[in-house]
Amino acid sequence: MLDVVFRALAFIAGVYLVADTVLAAIRSFVLPRSDSAWLNTAVFRLVRWVFENAARLGRSYEQRDRILALYAPVGLVMLPIAWLTMVSLGYTAIFWGLGEGDLERCFRISNSSLLTLGSEDPSHDVLPTAMSYSEATLGLLLLTLLISYLPTMYQAFSRRELTVARLELRAGIKASAVKLLLWLHGSGTLQNDGTQWREWEEWFVEIEETHTSLPIMAFFRSPQPGRSWITAADIILDTAAMISSTVNHPRDAHLELCFKAGCVSLNRVSRYFKYDAGAEESAGKAPAAPSRADFQSAYQQFQAAGLPLHDESVAWEQYQELRSRYAGAIAYLARLIMAPVIEPI
């Protein structure tokens, strides 16, 4: 009687483990909203711990960046391995619960079905045979699920990096908000650049969607070590904050919408990742907050360029208030993804 109870419990536990694993895959790549599964989180945390410690051995940022560039791809490859492992263990418990022999034979049946080897078959009873077929189906499903979503992920990555690269063309290799603002002024687009701000608004909206529904996207690093989506976001928002607070020109609705979209996007992505308690102690560094001296230097550059400006003290207070809406999210995400150093402004 006790043996029957143990086998029934093993069968139930196996079904639960298989169902939970399949749901983890669905929540990761099919569910169109931010959600997290314990198995996926555990895999990414383990892989992150390995790469984070390996990156600490790098003497320069370029060396660390080269190591960390592998984190997201390796994490993705490890996901189906973890899924298949859990499914294998779950079906091993199921076959044992159905009385297919000892654990070793049940393990062989499970892996033979999962990998479609056909080297070990269950009994001729209908239920064990059905379980064997269902395991083979799930194994193929889990593998194709990730493979089918890779093109979608890399298309989103390409769109994200296109904006990052274009920002470098405007603000230079060592980009900053001051350089971007001066470029906008020098190119004559500061007063009439609605198209650019709309493009950046759409970029922020897409980042919110992709980096919460497919969170591993946040860890895909730019092709060039000095670039990062989070530094680009910081520069765009800082530029918008400095224009709104410092430059005396008519209200720009497109700029305000872009700034709002950026604040909402980064704060939501940041809130999604706050479960990662180790981010505070990661190898990444938070960007330095702009000081009053930094702002005064920027203000003098704007004066030299002939920009109409508000009073410096009023502008500084307004800039600080606007920056407080996104600075915390920027600092958190910069540490989390180990972004390159961000200039104060």
Image (spheres, helix red, strand yellow):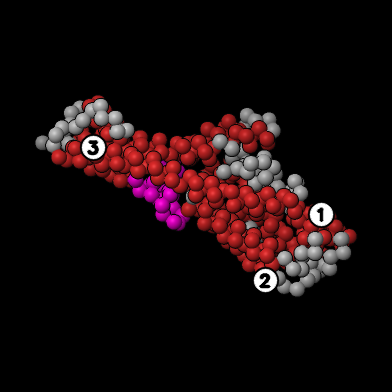
Q: Residue at x 75, y 73 (%)?
A: 250
Mark 2, Cα crowd under 10 Å, few <14 / some 14-19 / many 20+, is: few
| Relative side of 151 to 323, left or right | left
- In front of the other: 267 or 321: 267
| Residue 41 forms part of the magenta stretch | yes
Question: Given the image, on which type of amino acid does mark 1 rest?
Answer: Ala
Residue 11 visible in the displayed image: no
Q: Are marks 3 and 1 in contact (CB under 8 Å)?
A: no
- In front of the other: 252 or 341: 252
Mark 3 or 2, nearer chain start: 3
Above or below residue 155? Residue 326 is: below
Q: Residue at x 81, y 54 (%)?
A: 293
Q: Which mark is residue 253?
A: 2
Q: How far apart are the two marked residues, 1 and 2, measured between alpha carbons? A: 30 Å
**Element under label 3?**
helix
Mark 3, Cα crowd under 10 Å, few <14 / some 14-19 / many 20+, is: many
Where is residue 313 drawn, in percent x and y? 80, 65
Q: Residue at x 84, y 68 (%)?
A: 308
Q: Residue at x 57, y 43 (%)?
A: 220
Question: Given the image, on which type of amino acid does mark 3 rest?
Answer: Ser
Circle 3 is placed at which residue position? 132
Q: Which mark is residue 293?
A: 1
Residue 26 visible in the displayed image: yes
Give the extent of the magenta segment: 22-42
